[in-house]
Amino acid sequence: MRLSFLTKTVGLGALGVVMAANLAAAQCPAADTFEPNDDCLTAVALANGTYNSLTVEGTGGVYNDDFYSVNLPAGEQLVVDCLFLNANGDVDVYFYDPLTSPACGGEAAGDYLVRGFTASDNENVVWNNASAAAMTIIVRVELFSAVACNDYSLVVTTQPIPPGPCTGPDDSFEENDDCASAAVMPTGLTTGLRVSGAAFAVDDDYYVIQAVPNGEILTVDCLFVDATGDIDMTIFSDAACTTQVDGSFSTTDNEQVTASNLSGAPMDFYVRVYGFGTGFDCNNYDMSVTTAPDPCVSAIDDGLEDNDSCATAVALASGAHAALLTTVGDEDYYVLTVPVGEILTVDVTYVSGVSADVDLELFDDLACTNQVDFSFSFGGTGQVTWSNTTGVAASVVLRVAPDATTGSCNNYDLNIVTIPDPCAGTDDVLEDNDDCASATPVSDGTYSSLFTVDGDEDYYEVTVADLDTLTVDILFTDALGDLDLEIYESQADCVLDIPAVGSYGVVDNESVSYTNTTGATVTMVIHVYHWTGDSASNCNTYDMVIGGSGGSFATAMCFGDGSGTPCPCANESVLGAGEGCKSSLGVGAILTANGSASFAADDISFTVTQARALQPSMLVQGSTLIAVPFKDGVLCMGNPTERVEVVFLDANGEGTTATSIITNGNIPGPGATRYYQQWFRDPGGVSPCGNGSNFSNGLTVVYN
């Protein structure tokens, strides 16, 4: 599998060099003397030394990578320098362990040990064998650029691992690399500990804190500097380290875990300390172990006890209720009355991080069998809501319980409020349009003050001419109710619930576009509804904007205006402007298509406007559609991708492709769908997110 350029880290200053490299012709000598060495099985063994006049090939989508094997003794370091001219074609180098990656070809994290994939001359790749046994390293050399070949030299060096922070002697608690060999950790502060990770040699640390007294809380603090290496920690209640009772996984200095012993007897707890991520080398840390009486052992019930079951639930009125207590095995149940047409909101507050987090569950029956909302809260707050649409005043049951994984009890306050439910309001003027058959006819324009609620969805029908693109935007505040939007190509598809396209974000507003390619005028159906997974509300109001494109063969999409995936640093462009995310110019770039989508005519070209003047840019083609923040924009080109053409922008920040898109994009023929964006430089440290490049909006083209 080829690595897409979109997943490759490129220095900001080298972006123009990378683009220009595709225009240079590589030197193509005859096959080198090591061929054929095109896969893991035919890898050529190399010893220390320099190997010149080597050639790696890759053209027309068919790649002929070179594979070598090196024996790396225990305690030694392999250094491979791959020397080449990047202007003739970008070469990358990967190291593999054939025992864990037999095919030696994966490029996802975890497939390879380490790689060199810069966009400049030469690559330098290093791997340390910190194990107790020799290992074989497979070295893969690949041609990244879309050129025929490039020549290169290899310098192979094996040497003792140089002294460094991860090569000194183990700490005094080793070997404690698994639960079975856990070292006894005393209470108090222990210093001078060290853990190694995936980038050096995985060497987790396990400790056992013995005989924690019954009725006490164990607190373990791992003290370290995160900038040197991110350490995480978990704690278990069994000697096999299978029952985790707490974990700490932050990306800041220090981690803390706690465990409470309510077993009735002294108890052992096991702690695992480990490095996070494939780039973790090693880090030093100290460990502090303390025990203290668990306040839950001697806690006194509040004045509303005993209300320990659904059957003994205590009636609680609206308002504030303070100084309540819940413990493991002694949960609290309350009966709350909700007037007809009103919505109930229950907020819980408590002190977090000392005792247990407090969870809420809400049931709409007095037997507590039908849960209607829950809050598995953390951080000191939680909330549940319920709307009474039964037609009569109703009673619900609230359960309050401690999260046993974070502690055994806690004090808490409740605030209970009922207010008229806004979702019990009246229908909008386009009702009744609650199903496909009753869809309300609409046309281009803006429709304001519309309303949808669970069980009362909205359907609209609109006539779309052949090759016209229907664009629909719904504008709403997501915090008041999450709405989704779909387009069906026909009434039949609507009845079968087969949407042609949909927008299902969890942010303000939704937007969809769909082109009629049926060859005839059709009646499409627009579907707007409240997402039932939204527990904050069951309705919302919205405005709807409908527009057509006049039959353009390229459908605009992937806008940087917040209507879809948010821009990386809140640098959204103006809604409806059809731009990408804002660049340093204060506007987003716009990509348009010229010519036609005819495969035979081969006359399609692309023009970018509103980009940075006098900078290189690149037309990027994707075969699938994604939407992820990348650099300063939103990337919508999914793999497999093509770098179609480098376009140097003029003084107005504009440029048009000049070569064959059909040829450069490897378009297979009529019927192929491809997606396009323009990637352009935005240098000088002034780009909104500081990443130095950005993307235009996207275009969808279906070739005919």
Image (cartoon, grey):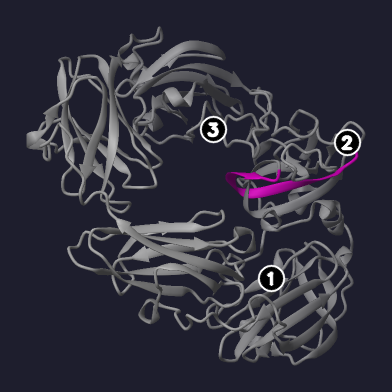
Q: Amino acid at mark 3?
A: Thr
* Residue 422 image point, x, y percent: 34, 14
95 or 127, nearer to the observer: 127
Whether residue 688 sits left or right of residue 477 in the image: it is right
Image point (84%, 36%), residue name: 612
Contact? badges 1 and 3 (CB < 8 Å): no
Of marks 1 and 2, the one in the foreground: 1
Q: Secondary structure at mark 1?
A: strand
Label 1 to label 2: alpha-carbon separation: 35 Å
Whether residue 71 sits left or right of residue 644 in the image: it is left
Residue 115's disc number: 1
* Residue 476 image point, x, y percent: 49, 21
Label 2 to label 3: alpha-carbon separation: 40 Å
Which of disc 3 and disc 1 is earlier in sequence?
1
Contact? badges 1 and 2 (CB < 8 Å): no
Q: What is the span of residues highlighted in magenta in the rendered image?
A: 614-631
Q: Secondary structure at mark 3?
A: loop
Give the residue number, with chain letter if any, for mark 2: 613
Residue furthest toward the left?
Answer: 311
Give the tally of numbered discs: 3
Q: Secondary structure at mark 2?
A: loop
Q: Please tell me in which quadrant of the rendered image residue 120 appears.
A: bottom right
Q: How many other residues sit within 10 Å of disc 1, few (<14), some (14-19) or many (≥20)? A: many
Q: How many other residues sit within 10 Å of disc 2, few (<14), some (14-19) or many (≥20)? A: some
Image point (64%, 63%), residue name: 228
Vertical relation: 185 (above or below) 510: below
Which of disc 2 and disc 1 is earlier in sequence?
1
* Residue 227 image point, x, y percent: 64, 59
Q: Amino acid at mark 1?
A: Arg
Give the residue number, with chain letter if any, for mark 3: 518
